[in-house]
Amino acid sequence: MLKVQIVLFDGFDLLDAIAPYEVFHAAATHTDNALNVEFVTAEGPRLVPSGIDGLKIEASGRLNPAHAGIILVPGAAGDVEGDGPDSIPAILGRAVNTELTVMMEQAFRQKNIVVATVCGGSLLLAMGGLLEGRSAVTHHLGMDVLGATGAIPVPARVVDDGNLVSGGGVTSGLDVALYLVERELGPRIAHAVEQLFEFERRGTAWKATGMAPKGHKTLTDNEPSSAAEQAPMTFATPENRITQALDFNGDWDTTITTPVGKMEVKLSISTSDGLIRGTAAQGDEIVELINPVLQDNMLVWSLRITKPMRLNLKFEVTASGDDMTGIAKAGILPASKLTGKRVS
């Protein structure tokens, strides 16, 4: 029997979860129950509030990341704009920081499990560092953020990356589930469900196989993904530019206020031979600033962070005396405010 576990978390999107549930349940009725579908959570059986007016759905079991079959992760429903506690990034961030991320990491290591996502479900996994280098899709508003996590965003309705199958916007839950039914149980069962629902799966499922279109270029892990990463390491060397760069030299204690909490980051910046170099320390993790460059009176760089979620952030900061102010931004996520003090 094919086991399907649909994972719920506080603030999940109803349609992301219920549409696939209906498809898989219908497939079960057409196969004498060769398929079983269940709502689960990382914590176990409980009533789970959705992001649609808090409407609750009962999960009957605990996610088993070792059970063969399909694990489907929906996205979140919340405020599209802003960075308040009810915003989609904040809801996803809270889900990332539960046991769900560890359990999904375990699931990816199993050879007999297919992980599926709908809409922001791929962002949830990507923000947990689980989709780096993987081809995936999410809602069109989150594609830049998906790329900022190290995943490879593909603008398709359904993306098949082996043991990872992802769907785009909220209604793609029907397409993802129908595609998986066809892939796992065959086209006749999928066709029977389509006839029952009077719905035909939309779009071609994208795979990295076969001939590539002429002129097609795929971003790889070794290629720059942001303007700051594409910029050269050197900056203009007139005397006034060097003086501006020296304004940033030293060690800085900074705080970045994000939708999912505050990040304390220690920056060390130096200037030598016309080059700006630096490191950022968060806890016991120290990483180099990616291509720090001076643009007018701003210092701009990129940084790959892993806490509280995995993102590639672009920083733009200014310095005035021993005070630093600026922003950190990933894709279309609201910019996070950075403030800092020079400590040496």
Image (tube, rainbow, N blue to C red):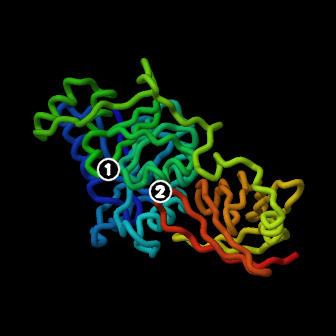
Label 1, residues with CA under 10 Å away: few <14, some 14-19, many ≥20:
some
> 253 or 278: nearer the eye?
278
Camera-near label (2 vs 1) is 1
Q: Please determine whether, in this image, residue 114 is positioned above or below residue 256.
A: above
> 168 or 30: nearer the eye?
168
Residue name at image x 64 percent, y 61 percent: 307
Question: What percent of the width, then of the height, locates residue 297?
Answer: 69, 69
Identify the amino acid type marked 2. Ala
> 55 or 174: nearer the eye?
174
Residue name at image x 72 percent, y 52 percent: 291
Please give the residue where the numbered disc 2 appears in the rendered image: 42
**Left or right: 265 in relation to 11:** right
**Element under disc 2:** loop
Identify the amino acid type marked 1. Gly
Q: Quadrant of the C terminus?
A: bottom right
Task: Work out which residue is located at the far front of the displayed protein and give it.
Answer: 238
**Element under disc 1:** loop
Q: Quadrant of the N terminus?
A: top left
Q: How many marks?
A: 2
Q: Please determine whether, in this image, residue 236 is positioned above or below residue 134.
A: below
Q: Please determine whether, in this image, residue 272 is positioned above or below residue 22.
A: below
Question: What percent of the width, then of the height, locates residue 155?
Answer: 38, 40
Q: Quadrant of residue 127?
A: bottom right
Q: Which mark is residue 169?
A: 1
Marked residue nearer the N-terminal end (2 or 1): 2
Q: Quadrant of residue 13?
A: bottom left
Mark 2–mark 1 Cα distance, whole angstroms, equals 24 Å
Question: What percent of the width, then of the height, locates residue 271?
Answer: 85, 60
Circles 2, 1 touching at the beta carbon (< 8 Å)? no
Q: Is residue 71 visible?
A: no
Residue name at image x 35 percent, y 43 percent: 167
